[in-house]
Amino acid sequence: MSNAESQAAVANEGGYSKKNPFPSTLKQRRLLNKPGSTKEVQHLELCLTGSGLEYRPGDSLAIIPTNSDRLVADVMEAGGLDADVRVELANGNSAPLGQALKNEFDVSGLTKSVLKKYNQLAQSDKIEALLDPENAAGLKEYLWGREVVDLLSDFPVAGMTAGDFCSVLRKITPRLYSIASSPLAHPGEVHLTIAVLRYHSHGRDREGVCSTYAAERVVVGETMPVFLHHDKHFKLPEDGNTPIIMVGPGTGIAPFRAFVEERAATGADGRSWLFFGDRNRETDFLYGEEFERYHADGKLTRIDLAFSRDQEEKVYVQHRMLENGAELYAWLNDGAMFYVCGDASRMAGDVHEALITIAEREGGHSREAAEAWLKQLQDDRRYLRDVY
Ligand SMILES: Cc1cc2nc3c(=O)[nH]c(=O)nc-3n(C[C@H](O)[C@H](O)[C@H](O)COP(=O)(O)OP(=O)(O)OC[C@H]3O[C@@H](n4cnc5c(N)ncnc54)[C@H](O)[C@@H]3O)c2cc1C
């Protein structure tokens, strides 16, 4: 499933959905990175008691965030808008603009269609030029690292009304997070592993809407609107004896914490092998103590780690796979399932390529035969991805 499809997906579990989310209480939150890390990944524990929501490892939870007060204030200032003016909402009610922008609208994501709608107000030749189908590269360059606030600053519309502005905006969209817990290990709870997004572009400090909502704006004890998104295929094998290989660097570790917990709780005997990677072992080995304990107890057969910044040359999970290619190939030939979770832009492709190389080296296959072998694994649903 593509990122966009996943993000747009609307589950309807126990009556809860995008339109009618469950108010789940945040029970606990803790930073997974140790002091001195260059990353910020939060572990969240949410309460599902009384919801009737039932998930399995491999499913995701959707969160419907609200925007930060700072972002809303910046947008209103850039647009010369008054927070107290009432605007119509899609449900027929009305609300003060400040409140509507915080709760209802996507006031950050800049897309071609937002640009197009905005230009009905701005009537700008420069925006028109960006929208020219011949100018896809120019549009891409403008959109990269920019948000709605930049559009308002770059192309101000004199006398824009609050209603006009809202008509340009999309509704705020839910974000999906791979579930990091087994319900057998944590009844009535769901755990998430959320990387907090902060970056600087075009002269502004920016932040991800939902990751900062979950990481800092919701206070422990408060509720957040959520609903479940089931993934039919990204599941543990029915047979607990089937070996599993899990590749989950960074937040890609989330579903594998759930898998390992589930297998420990059910007493599944199958072998399991985890590849994890991040920047530094000292600070970024997410759930490190838990996985080391599972490994020591024999609940996790193997664990191979790749910390890219612990040595001169960058080492990633695909390198660890290649180093252990013979064994990995043997596991796959023994019927192991192969799971990948995390970054879609580079990691998933690098892991895919490493699998092809392993099949060439260890199976003596040509490139075409190795690709066909991998395609067969995918068709057999033994090679599964949850990437974003
Ligand atoms: C199936 C699935 C499972 C997922 N599981 C997890 C998970 O377990 N943990 C997790 O943390 N996330 C997960 N995600 C990603 C998650 O859904 C969100 O996309 C992520 O948290 C960012 O959302 P946000 O609202 O904080 O950022 P947004 O407000 O949506 O901002 C993201 C946008 O910021 C821009 N941007 C980001 N970085 C930069 C940069 N350096 N320079 C310029 N522009 C930039 C890009 O346009 C990007 O699209 C998953 C996604 C899917 C589809």
Image: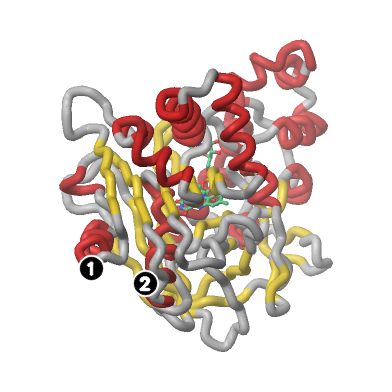
- The span from disc 2 to disc 1 (Cα, nearest Å) is 10 Å
Give the image's coloring scheme.
secondary structure
The residue pinned by badge 1 equals 297
SS of the residue under disc 2: helix
Q: Residue at x 34, y 45 (%)?
A: 275
The residue pinned by badge 2 equals 264
| Quadrant of the snapshot with the C terminus | top right
Q: In this view of the protein, which residue sits in the foreground, 177 or 94? A: 177
**Which is nearer the N-term, disc 2 or disc 1?**
2
SS of the residue under disc 1: loop
Q: In this view of the protein, which residue sits in the foreground, 110 or 310? A: 310
Q: In this view of the protein, which residue sits in the foreground, 53 or 88? A: 53
The quadrant holding residue 99 is: bottom right
Q: What amino acid type is highlighted by mark number 1?
A: Asp
Is residue 53 positioned above or below 84 on the image? below
Is residue 140 positioned above or below 75 on the image? above
Cβ atoms at labels 2 and 1 below 8 Å apart: yes
| Quadrant of the snapshot with the N terminus | top right
Is residue 386 positioned above or below 349 on the image? below
- Residue sitting at the far bottom: 50
Q: In this view of the protein, which residue sits in the foreground, 32 or 127? A: 32
Q: Position of residue 339 (x, y in %)?
A: 49, 48
Q: Position of residue 32 (x, y in %)?
A: 28, 57
